[in-house]
Structures are given as C-alpha cells and as structure tokens.
Amino acid sequence: MFSEDARILVIDDEKEITEIVDAFLTTAGYDVAIENTAQSGIERAQSFKPHLILLDIMMPSMDGYEVCNRLKQSTVTADIPVVFLTGKDARDDQGRSFRAGCDLFVKKPFSCERLLDIVRIVLLSVSK
C-alpha cells in the first residue's frame, strides 16, 4: 500500500537534522513535513496526517516521550507509527520509548541510507 508517496513528519529541535532528513527523504520520493518544536509537531501531525513520524526525544519544553504519548492519545494520530531518533542509548530509555508508544528506537548518529531502510521497513509493516 505505502511506497515512496507516503507522508512522513519529522519532529526535531535541531534544524540541521530536519533539513538533512527532509532533503534525503524528499529525494527518495517521500512527501516530507518538518517541525522544530514539539507543539508544532503535534499540530502538524493532526493536519498533515503522516503515514510515519520520526521524532527526537530530547527537545526543550516537551520531550519526545510526552509528544508520543499525546499523539497516541488522539484518535487522529493514534495509529501512526513513531520512530524515535535520538542520541540517548541506555536500555531504560529504550524501554521508556516503547512504553510511550514508539515503534522503533534509532540511535544518532545514523546514516541516511540506514534511515531510508528503516522508513521502508516500517511503512511496509504498516501496509500489511
């Protein structure tokens, strides 16, 4: 069902990261939206209705755990897969990520090729 025409929302407070991921995924054919604050990311998820959300954990004002919790509580966004992209590595953080409702936990730094593979895998698993 999903292919390169899927919509992907990237939420990360680091503009350099969102710009790189946006450029790479757009080049791969995806429809990408980026947000650099937690609140704007939640709002964009409601209107853009992405097929996948790539979300940073460590953000000011509201962390990715809270963003994910809010997304999973909304009927509009509850079924959208969330992949955490983070510099955090501890097993406790991975467990907390899954308890918050994320589908995958990807450690930064990562290659764009690896991210593309992850995006394809997650979208393929959702389309089945």
Image (spheres, helix red, strand yellow):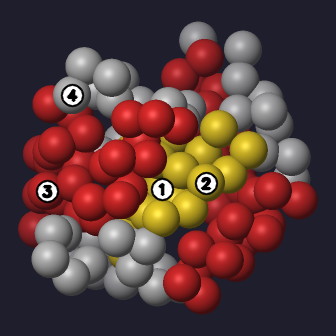
Q: Dots 4 and 2: beta carbons under 8 Å?
A: no
Of circles 1 and 4, the one toward us is 4
Distance between the alpha carbons at the discs numbered 1 and 2:
10 Å
**5 or 88, nearer to the observer:** 5
Mark 4 surroundings: few (<14), some (14-19) or many (≥20) residues within 10 A = few
Answer above or below: position of 32 versus 110.
above
Distance between the alpha carbons at the discs numbered 4 and 2:
19 Å
- Residue found 64% across the figure and 62% down from its top: 115
Q: Secondary structure at mark 4?
A: loop
Of circles 1 and 2, the one toward us is 2
Residue 42's x, y, as percent?
Answer: 31, 49
Task: Residue under label 2, please give it.
Answer: 33
- Residue found 35% across the figure and 47% down from its top: 43
Mark 2 surroundings: few (<14), some (14-19) or many (≥20) residues within 10 A = some
Task: Residue under label 1, please give it.
Answer: 54
Task: Residue under label 4, please give it.
Answer: 74
Mark 1 surroundings: few (<14), some (14-19) or many (≥20) residues within 10 A = many
Is residue 33 visible in the rendered image? The answer is yes
Task: Residue under label 3, please give it.
Answer: 66
